[in-house]
Amino acid sequence: MTVLEQPGPYRPAPPPAWQPRTDPAPLLPDAEPLRLLGTPAAAGLDPALLLELHGQLVRGRRYNAQATALTRQGRLAVYPSSTGQEACQVAAGLVLQQQDWLFPSYRDTLAAVVRGLDPVQALTLLRGDWHTGYDPAEHRVAPLCTPLATQLPHAVGLAHAARLKGDDVVALALVGDGGTSEGDFHEALNFAAVWRAPVVFLVQNNGFAISVPLAKQTAAPSLAHKAVGYGMPGRLVDGNDAAAVHHVLTDALRCARSGGGPTLVEAVTYRLDAHTNADDATRYRGDAEVEAWRAHDPVTLLERELTGRGLLTEDVIRAARDAAERMAADLRERMNQDPVLDPMELFAHVYAEQTAQLRAQAAQLRAELTAAGELPGAPEGGPQEGRQR
Amino acid sequence: MTVLEQPGPYRPAPPPAWQPRTDPAPLLPDAEPLRLLGTPAAAGLDPALLLELHGQLVRGRRYNAQATALTRQGRLAVYPSSTGQEACQVAAGLVLQQQDWLFPSYRDTLAAVVRGLDPVQALTLLRGDWHTGYDPAEHRVAPLCTPLATQLPHAVGLAHAARLKGDDVVALALVGDGGTSEGDFHEALNFAAVWRAPVVFLVQNNGFAISVPLAKQTAAPSLAHKAVGYGMPGRLVDGNDAAAVHHVLTDALRCARSGGGPTLVEAVTYRLDAHTNADDATRYRGDAEVEAWRAHDPVTLLERELTGRGLLTEDVIRAARDAAERMAADLRERMNQDPVLDPMELFAHVYAEQTAQLRAQAAQLRAELTAAGELPGAPEGGPQEGRQR
Amino acid sequence: MTTAPAGPGLKPATMAEALRRALRDAMADDPAVHVLGEDVGTLGGVFRITDGLAKEFGEDRCVDTPLAEAGIMGTAVGMAMYGLRPVVEMQFDAFAYPAFEQLVSHVSRMRNRTRGALPMPLTVRVPYGGGIGGVEHHSDSSEAYYAATPGLHVVTPATVADAYGLLRAAIASDDPVVFLEPKRLYWSKAAWDPERPDEVPGIGRAVVRRRGTSATLITYGPALPVCMEAAEAAVDEGWDLEVVDLRSLVPFDEETVCASVRRTGRAVVVHEAPGFGGPGGEVAARVTERCFHHLEAPVLRVTGFDIPYPPPMLEKHHLPGVDRVLDAVARLQWESDWTERTPGTAAATDDESGAR
Amino acid sequence: MTTAPAGPGLKPATMAEALRRALRDAMADDPAVHVLGEDVGTLGGVFRITDGLAKEFGEDRCVDTPLAEAGIMGTAVGMAMYGLRPVVEMQFDAFAYPAFEQLVSHVSRMRNRTRGALPMPLTVRVPYGGGIGGVEHHSDSSEAYYAATPGLHVVTPATVADAYGLLRAAIASDDPVVFLEPKRLYWSKAAWDPERPDEVPGIGRAVVRRRGTSATLITYGPALPVCMEAAEAAVDEGWDLEVVDLRSLVPFDEETVCASVRRTGRAVVVHEAPGFGGPGGEVAARVTERCFHHLEAPVLRVTGFDIPYPPPMLEKHHLPGVDRVLDAVARLQWESDWTERTPGTAAATDDESGAR
Ligand SMILES: Cc1ncc(C[n+]2csc(CCOP(=O)(O)OP(=O)(O)O)c2C)c(N)n1
Ligand SMILES: Cc1ncc(C[n+]2csc(CCOP(=O)(O)OP(=O)(O)O)c2C)c(N)n1
Ligand SMILES: [Mg+2]
Ligand SMILES: [Mg+2]
C-alpha cells in the first residue's frame, strides 16, 4: 500500500525519536586563550596564591635544569624536560585535593613533585632502576605513562569507580597535543562524557610532538574544540599564565566534583628545551621561535605581575631561589648515589603468586649470580660451577 | 635575573606562536537535521531524481525483505537488514561517480547494490562461501567491513593516494552511530582533515548499536558536532529523507572533489528490523518507538512528496514494484543454487607465493579430500589410505 | 561429555548457563565485581552470558559501554586501580584487538610496573574460535597472542563444570586473566548441579579427561570434544589414548602433561588456532625438553591451517576433526620402539614424521 | 661481524645507514613507495633511518603523520588499495600495539579476503628489542605476535648487508612484511659497499653464519652477535658450534635449519623475546618433528625470561648472553650418544635436560 491510497491531507512528519539536542555554544571554548596575569582581571587574584605559584615555578624551573644536568652525568637514562611548561605543571600539581588522583605522562614528573612526590621517586623511571618509583595508591599519582594517551581511560575508570563508591575523588589527566590524535584520547573522552565521570583532561599543547608541529597534528580551530564532539565543555587557556591555568583547572575540578561531568582544557604553552636530552630540536625549529616564546616565559609573566603589585620583594626572590637550590642540591646528592638493586626482583611482581616456570627461571638467575659472586651472601671467588663436556 | 631587574614599563606579552584560529561556526551543523521532502524547498527538486530515488527505495525495501527471507531458508548465514535506512543506502549508492570509491560496513550491501554490484556478489560474505564476493578494485567498492570503523582510515588513505596521483577520486565511507565511538573513527577523521583528503564520512545514526541506544553512546549535541574537533564541516540531515541525504552528500562530495577536504555527515534514521535476523529487538526497545518511526518511513516520505506533485502515477508504482519483484525473483533463484566451492582455495590467497608450509598443508587437505572422494577427479570409493599401527 | 546423564541433584546445563551463573554468583558475593562491555546490559550480551545481571545488580554493576574496546579495557584498568574487580566482555575474538595495547602495555604489566602496588584483578572474557558459521572476524583463535604476553593468565574451559569453576577462579584472581570461552561449546550440555557446583582446583591445573596407555592427546577448549571423540574412535584401531585438557595455557601445568607423556611415550597436541606460532609449538617444545628420553616419536601437532580463518562454508576443512587427529596418531611411529631403532633406518622416516 | 675490515670498494657502514640507503633506493626506483610515520619527515625519525628522505622526495613521499598508529596503519592500507607501496614506521615496538587490529584484521588478510584482488604490498618497520637502556615500553620483543598471524611475513636482519637486502626485498614484496629492526644493532658496523650492495636471496632464507659440527645455535636479529661470540668462546671448551641466522621467521626456512641440525645432532634456539609462547617454541617443535632421530638431546631454548621487559639497570640480567648460551650448550647431554643410551639411565637426566 502506498500513501496514494491513504486519504487525508499531506503533512511532513518529524522523525519521532529526534529530539533537538542541547545548544553547543556553552561547550565551545573562547576564541582566545584565557589570560589573567597582566590583565585587569589579575587584580582579583589572591596574593598568597600568586606567591605560592611563584615559589613553585622557580623551584620547578630549577628542577628541570637539575634533572637535565643529571642526564649529562649519566644519572638519568633520559629526561623529557618541562622547561617552559612549568605553569601547567605547577597548577596541575596544586589544584588537586588530597584524595584526588593525578594521571601524568612521562613529561609530567614536575606536576607529581609539586603534588608532593619525592623527586627521586618521581625520577625512578627515567633513572632506570625500576618502572614506577612510588606507590601510586599512596600518593594518588598514577604511574608516569609512556604509551601516549593510554592513561586517559584509566583516569576515567578510576574517577567513575570512585563516584560509584560514593567517594569525593576527581581525576586530573595530562596529555600532550600529539596525544590527542590517539584513539585512546577519543575513547576516554567519550566514556567520560557518557558516564559524566568526575575527570578533567588537561592538554598541554606545547606546539610539538617531538618534531611534529601542531599544524600537522590537527586542522581543528583549537584542541579545546574537540570537547563539543563529546558533549563536554572545552576551555582554552594561556598555558604559561600560571594563574589562568590554576583558575581554569580549579573551575573544571569544581564542576567535576559537583557532578557536572568532565571538562577538556587546552593550555597553550611551549616546550623550550628539546623533546628529551637525546633530541636535537634544531632539526625542526628555529631559534627565533624559541626566543619569542622565552619572552612569554611563565616565570617572567608571573614575576611581572608580582612586580606590578609590589609583591616581588628581595625576600621573596631569595626565599624562592634558596628553596629551589636546596631541592636541587638534595636531588643531586641523592641521585648521585647508586640505587641498590636486587636482580631477583625481576620475578617478584609478575604475578601475585610465582608460577612454577618463573620459579625455575628465578632459580637459574640466582644460580648465575651466585656463581658470579653478584648476590649478597654469594661466595666471593667461591667454587664456580664449571661446564662439563 | 628576574624581570625586577629589567627596566621599562610592564606589558603583557601575547604568546608569540599563538594564532587565533578559524571561526568554528561554519563547521558546526545546524540544530535541526536538513529536510527537503514536504518542505517548500522540495519544489526545486528535479522530478527525474525524485523518481529515480523512488524506484531505488522500493527496490531497496524489497531487497531487504528478500535477503531477510533468505536467512530463514538457510541461504544466508546472517543478514543485517537496512530496512528503514534505505534513503541513506540509496543516496550513498547514487551520488558517487564511476571512479569514486564506496567503503561500506556489513550493513551496507544495499548501497553497494545501488552502486551497481550484483546482489549475489554483495551477499557472498553473508552467505558464507567467501569473505568478499566481488573484486573491490573493479567496482570501487571496498570489502564490506565487519570490524567497526576500521574501514574509515582505509577510505582516507585511498582518497589521499588518489589525490597524490592526481586522480579525480572521492571516497565515501559509511559508519554507524556505534562506530563513531571507536578510536579508528577519531584517527581517520583527523588524518582526513590534516591531509585535506577527498573523503566524505556518512554516519547512519539509526539509533542503536545492536541494543545500545545513542544516549549510552554519546553525550554530544549530535554526532555531526564531532566534526568541529577535526576542523571539518559537520552536517546533519534527516536520514529518511532521500532527497535531503542525496543533496547533502552531493554537496560534500563536490567540496571534497574540489580540494575542500572532508565532511562529516550525520544522517538521522532508524533501523526498523532487528540488528540481524539473529537478534531479538524486543529485548531493548518497544513497539511504540518502532511504530512511530514507521510513520516516518523513507518510502512513505518520498511517496507523499511525489503524490503532492502528482508524480506518483499508477505506472510509476507498477514499474517500481515490477522492477523490485524481478530483482527479488532473480536473487531468490540464484541464491537458491548451492555455490560451487573449492576447499583448496583456502590456501590460494594467503600469500602471492605459497610458502613451503602452506604447500604441505594444502597437500594434506588435498589428500584427505581425495581419499574421501570429495575432490573433482578423486577416485570415488577408490583405495583409501588405511591407518597403520 | 555433551549429554552426560543427570544424577541426583544434577540437571543438564549448558556452558553458557554455567558462565552466567558464575558471573551472577561472583557479583552477589563481591560488590567489587563489575561487568562491562558492549550489549552486556539490557540485551544480556549477544551470547546471553550476562543475561539478567543488569536487572539484578543494576546498570552500574553491569554496564552497556560505548562501542570502543580500548575504552572498555582502559576504563577497566582505572576501575581496578581503585579496587574494583572488573569483568570485561570483548564481544568476539577479533574485536578484542583494538584493546591489545591496553592489555599488553597496561593490564599485563601494571603489577610489575608498580612493584606490586597496583594489582590488576581484571577478567577479560573473550568468546573465541570457530565452528559456528560466523562471518570473517568472528571466529579467530587468538590465544597465541595472550599466551606470549608475560603477566597475563590465559584460561579456557572445555566443560560445563570448568566454565563455572574457572570463571569464578578468574574473577577471584588478583591477577589479570584472559578467559577464553569456546563459542561452539556455549550450547554444549552436561549434568551439573548449579546449587553445588563442582570444585575446580583453581587456575593452572590441567586434567586428564581420559586415561589411556598408547599416546597422549594434549588439548584445550573447543578441541577437547574432538579429542574425546577421537579417543573413542581410536579404540577400534587398537589405540588406547589418554586425553589431557590443559584448561590453563598460562600458568602451564607441566607436571600433569609431562607425567602423562612419560607414561604413554607419545603425544599429539591438538588445537584450532593456526599451527605456526600457536600454543602447540610451546607445548611440544616444552614436553620434548622435559620428556625427551621417554618419547617414542616426536610430539606431533594437529592444528588449524596457517591461514586466515575461512568463510563459514569452508570452515569444516580447517578445523581439526577426529580423522585428522587419528591420522596424526597413526604417524607416531608405532612400527618400532626407539630402543630397537638404528640411526640409519630411523632417519629414513624423518620427513614423514611431521607432514604438518 | 661488527668490525669487519674494509676490502676494496668496501666501507664500514652501520645497519642504520644500510636501512636508510635501502629506503632511499627503493623510493628512487619506484614512485609508488611512500614512507609514513611519526617524525619520519623533518626529523628523519628518532633513529634517523628516514633521514633526508623528505628532503629528497618531498613531504608527500615521506610523511610526518599525526600521532596515531592505527591511523598510520589504516591509511597505509587504503594507500596500498590504491596501488601504492607504503612503508610505515612504528616508532618503537610497544607503540605498534595500537595498530594491532589494523594489522591483524586487515593488513594480514586483505589479499585473502578479496580472493587476491587487493594485495597488501605494505612494509611495517618496527624497531624492536632491548639492550639500549630504554625506559618501559621501548624494548619489547614482539615477534611472537606477528609470527602467529597468518598472512604476514616476518623478517629481521642481523647484519648490515641483510639490513639493506631484506628491506629492499620487503618493500618489493607484494605481501605485507613486518620488518623487525634490532634496535641495539642499529649502530653495529660492517664493511659494506653501498654502491654494490650484496645480493641477499630474498625473504624466507636462513643462512649458516658459522659452520660447526658439535651443535647448532638457531637464532635471529639481536641475538645473532651473542651467538657468534658464544661460538667463538665455545672453541675453548672444545665445542665447534654452527650458527644459523633465521633472518625470516615467516616464511620459515625449514630446509636450512633442519639440514644443520641433522648434521650436528644438537640444537639450542636463542632469542631475546620471552620464552613461553615465543618463536623458539615453534622452532624447537618444528625441528624436533623433522629431525627427531638425529637429535642426541632435546632442542633447548635460551630466551628472555617470562617477564615484562625490565628497567634499564636490570636488563642485562634478562638478555640472553654468551654465558647463558654456553650453559645451555653444556646441557646438551654430551655424556653419551643416543645409540648408546638405555631408557633407564636416560630418563634419569630428563628433569635436568631443560632447566628453563
Ligand atoms: C603510543 C605511542 N606512540 C608513540 C610514542 C613515541 N613518542 C613519545 S613522546 C612522543 C611525542 C608526544 O607528543 P605530545 O603528545 O605533544 O607530548 P609532548 O612530548 O609534547 O609533551 C612520541 C611520538 C609513544 N610514547 N606512545
Ligand atoms: C570492533 C568491533 N567491535 C564490536 C563489533 C560487534 N558489533 C557488530 S555490529 C555492532 C553494533 C554496531 O552499531 P552501529 O555502529 O551503530 O551500526 P549499526 O549496526 O547500527 O548499523 C557491534 C557491537 C564489531 N563488529 N567490531
Ligand atoms: Mg607536545
Ligand atoms: Mg547504529
Image (tube, coloured by chain):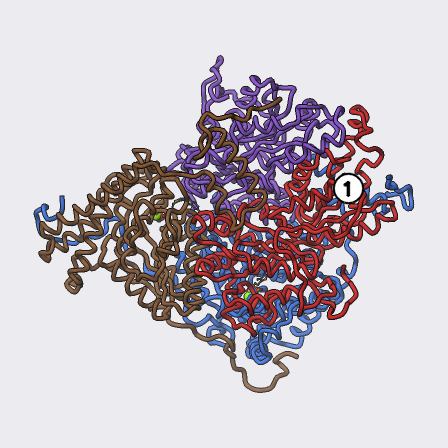
Chain colours: A brown, B blue, C red, D purple
Q: Does D240 sit above or below residue A50? A: above
Q: Does D168 sit above or below residue D82? A: above
Instruction: Specify the quadrant that holds the N terminus of chain A.
Output: bottom right
Q: Does C110 sit above or below residue D245? A: below
- Could you tell me the amino acid type at mark 1? Thr
Q: Nearer the viewer, residue B14 or D95?
A: D95
Residue B157 in sight: no
Q: Secondary structure at mark 1?
A: helix
In the rendered image, the residue lying farthest to the top is D8
The spot of residue B385 in percent (x, y) is 87, 40
Residue B54 in sight: yes
Question: Residue at 24% across / 48% down in the picture?
Answer: A60
The spot of residue B53 in percent (x, y) is 59, 67
Picture quadrant of ligand 2: bottom right
Left or right of B384, for residue C308: left
Question: Residue at 14% across / 52% down in the picture?
Answer: A304
Left or right of D306, for residue B11: left
The answer to whether mark 1 is within 8 Å of ligand 2 is: no
The spot of residue C241 in percent (x, y) is 80, 47
Q: Nearer the viewer, residue B347 or D234?
A: D234
Q: Nearer the viewer, residue C144 or B56?
A: C144
Left or right of B49, for residue B198: left
Residue placed under numbered mark 1 in the picture: C264
- Label 1 chain ID: C
